[in-house]
Image (tube, grey):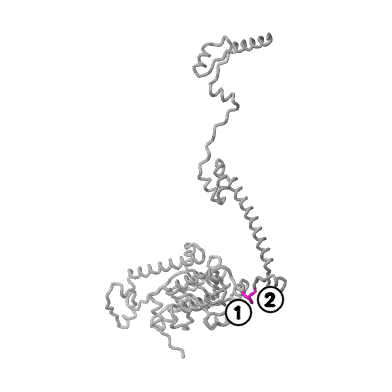
Amino acid sequence: MRERMNYPMIAARVFNTPLLIAQAKADIILSVLSERLGFEAAAPQEPVETQTPDAAAATFRSAGFSYSDRGYYLRDGIAAIPVIGTLVQRGGYLGYSGMTSYDAVESMFNAALASSEVEQILFEVDSPGGEVAGAFDLAALIHSARNTKPITAIASEMAASAAYLLGSAAGSMWVARSGYTGSIGVVTAHLDVSEEMEKRGRAVTWIYAGKHKVDGHPYAALPKAVRDDIQADIDRLYGMFTSAVATHRGMSEAAVRATEARVFLGQLGVDAGLADRVGSFNECVEHLLSQSTRFGGRSFRLASHSQSEKTTMSEKENGAATITAQQLETAKAEAKAEGVKAGAAAERTRIAGILNHANAEGRADMAKHLAFETDQTVEAASALLAVSPKAAATAAAPADPLAAAMERTGTPAVGDGGADAAAAAAATQGGGAVINASDIFAKRAATFRGGQSA
């Protein structure tokens, strides 16, 4: 016989306790507790429906999974772990309202990691979230194991708040077409029953030591200082949440905070960066099987040379294709050649982009250095060129050696024997040489006549 629900215990885990839970589910919890604990709460606006453990088991069985005595479900090397209902730290009251404990999920996860029969791990998530306690430690464990075995999570149909924190820690995140991801936020509630107690003529007197010993008790309105302390804790936890999701998903923390704790339907979650692809649970399983290297999965399996021309009937029936070692090596060689070709083309494009960039004008040496001696992108190189000084302009070279010599000696004064004396003197004072054309002619004539006489 099912034991009676311990409502005061549940209330202690709801009020004045930070929660990573979707607001709609929090409304439901408050509505249920209000009936049992004697206070009024607003009716929930949107009921949150999640699977029960029995429904989850039926989902796994319909997808070809068998129950393992280690808690998870197994099919062809894939261990499916249910993350169903409200998430709590301890499993003492598991089963009430479809709750799942973090320690139960951790136990299944560790067993799957350690098992040689498990190649991949799949979290099937249908949860509005739950308690803070235990959530971050489990998410860190999942994230740290991503390089040990492939880990996938699917929101089928809800991965909200703490449940999304766990799902985001997986290496890949799927979401059903009608599924939800997000609700990246933190919430808590304070219950004030002081007016109700006053109406009943009752009062509670606290006798305590330590200023903050009874902070947040329900028999008085919440003081501002206590409210500020609670808000500070909520803000710190929110920072932990957004930072963890940013790390898990490779996003900026600003982008995570920009979601403002919204939940996203199907493809919208992919568009927001919270999930990788849309698909049903069965589609996700089939995809994982296509990636499997275990016998029985719809996969490509490496065969020995003696098997190179053989395909068994069971392989044909399972839709598997066999690749020989020679075919694999050929494929690798072709892929390498294509990569080298593409890389060379990309490098030529990069070099030309730098050398021909508008910012390279007047900075040719700098552009050549960036193009040939570094691996800077065109964008990065152009930015460096833009802030680099241009080469100083050089004076034009003289037209010929005679002109250069004339520049060095000054402009000579050329004239006949009757050249104006003032002009000659001026030229001499300016550093120029005075040349008498008549004297030059007479000397040339004498030389010419002497040559003839000889």
Which one is in front, 246 or 406?
406
Quadrant, the C terminus: top right
Quadrant of the rendered structure where residue 80 is?
A: bottom right
Q: Are marks 2 and 1 in contact (CB under 8 Å)?
A: no
Q: CA distance from mark 2 to mark 1?
A: 20 Å
**Residue drawn at point x = 34 percent, y = 73 percent:** 222
Q: Is residue 345 magenta?
A: no
Magenta stretch prevailing secondary structure: loop
Quadrant of the rendered structure where residue 34 is?
A: bottom left
**Residue drawn at point x = 51 percent, y = 16 percent:** 428
Residue placed under numbered mark 1 in the picture? 63
Which one is in front, 227 or 174?
174
The x and y percentages for residue 381 are 54, 48
Residue 441 is marked as none
Q: In the image as oriented, which residue stretches furthest toward the bottom?
A: 1
Q: Secondary structure at mark 1?
A: loop
The x and y percentages for residue 150 are 56, 71
Mark 2: few, some, or many residues within 10 Å (few <14, many ≥20)?
some
The x and y percentages for residue 323 are 68, 69
User: The residue under label 2 is which amino acid type?
Assistant: Glu
Tell me the magenta residue range. Answer: 294-298
User: The residue under label 1 is which amino acid type?
Assistant: Ala
Q: Secondary structure at mark 2?
A: helix
Residue placed under numbered mark 2 in the picture? 315
The x and y percentages for residue 451 are 67, 11
**Residue drawn at point x = 41 percent, y = 77 percent:** 14
Q: Nearer the viewer, mark 2 or mark 1?
A: 2
Compared to 339, does 94 lie above or below?
below
Compared to 378, does 70 lie above or below?
below
Mark 1: few, some, or many residues within 10 Å (few <14, many ≥20)?
some
